[in-house]
Amino acid sequence: MQIYHTLMLGIIVTGLLFIGNASADSIKSQLEASPRHGEWVKVTTADARTVNAFVVYPEVKEPATAIIVIHEIFGLTDWIRLVADTLAAEGFVAICPDLLSGMGPDGGGTESFDSGDDVRRTIRELSSSQVASDLDAVQKYVRDLPSTNDNVAVSGFCWGGGQTFSYAVHSDTIAAGFVFYGRAAPIEDVPKISVPVYGFYGESDNRINATIDATKAAADAANVTYEPVIYEGVGHAFLRRGMAEDANESQKAATKAAWERWVSLLEGL
């Protein structure tokens, strides 16, 4: 099975709003300086759970495609919120739920945990049924917004990428799934997918990439659209690393190429 490789050496990244110093202070400054409207909302699930989410609106005339952004294993961070803001700058309504809502100390979310280890441990303990229920509610919320059209896509990074693949198995109402270096769905579940899934992977990420060939073969056999792209010269979490001020040229180039592909696919929905 052919895996698609993108070689983008020598390209200087200048067009992405979020490229540059990705320190915590810089990210907060970029969020605060954004001209787009972003707000925290509460989404109620079918089983009465409350999920906190951050939604950002584009400055466009017509109803826009919506994109759900699922966070990494680090929980809902300002970096994920910045990704959502940048998607809004491209013309999409972006919403990022905190899937740790109510799971932290005193019923808090990501921000309430004392350490990153506590965040990661709790995320690993989340049930797949709760995550799916949360995402169902977020999808309904964003569909009901007057500012969105009929297209709702789902994307995720790292742990969130794996959840995106799983949600593509679960939901037949999303327009597409965008998996950034996340684990694939179990092979036996691949034929259940009825929406296109697009993968974004770093070349040096063998834990994740080890299942791409088998997943692609299963998808092809079931007439499921699964299009993985491997970006050369980078590893896991390359999009986050490509944002850092110390990013190397391969990381910057992979980030630029992946972002342009993502936006192009979203525009084509």
Image (cartoon, rainbow, N blue to C red):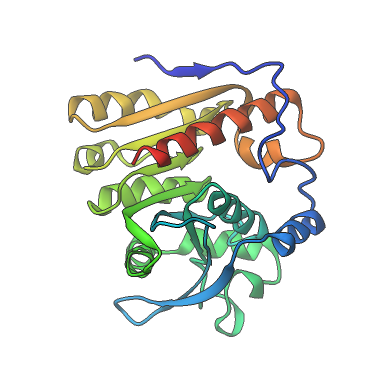
From the viewer's side, name the closer residue of 44 and 141.
141
**Quadrant housing residue 197:** top left
Considering only vertical position in the picture, is 7 above or below 95?
above
Relative image position of residue 244 (x, y in whole percent): 76, 41
Q: Is residue 26 above or below residue 7?
A: below
The residue positioned 37% from the left and 70% from the top of the image is 141
Residue 199 placement: quadrant: top left
Return the residue nearer the eye: 176 or 37.
37
The quadrant of the image that shows the C terminus is top left
Closer to us: 141 or 210: 141
Looking at the image, residue 176 sits to the left or right of residue 123; the answer is: left
Q: Position of residue 177 (x, y in %)?
A: 37, 44
Residue situated furthest bottom in the rendering: 106
Would you identify the image quadrant in which residue 2 lies?
top left
Image position of 58 with respect to 45: above or below: above
Residue at position x 66%, y 61% in the image: 35
Looking at this view, is 147 or 77 the one in front?
A: 147
Q: In this view, does 190 lie to the left or right of 239?
A: left
x then y, percent, for residue 149:
33, 57
- Asked if residue 184 shows in the view, the reply is yes
Count of all numbered marks drawn on residues in the image: 0
Q: Where in the figure is residue 239, as x and y percent of width and height?
A: 62, 38
Q: Is residue 89 found left or right of 11 in the rendered image?
A: left
The residue lying at 44 percent from left, 41 percent from top is 179
Which residue lies at the image location 51% right of the left edge and 37% below the top edge? 181
Q: Is residue 103 visible?
A: no
The quadrant of the picture occupied by the N terminus is top left
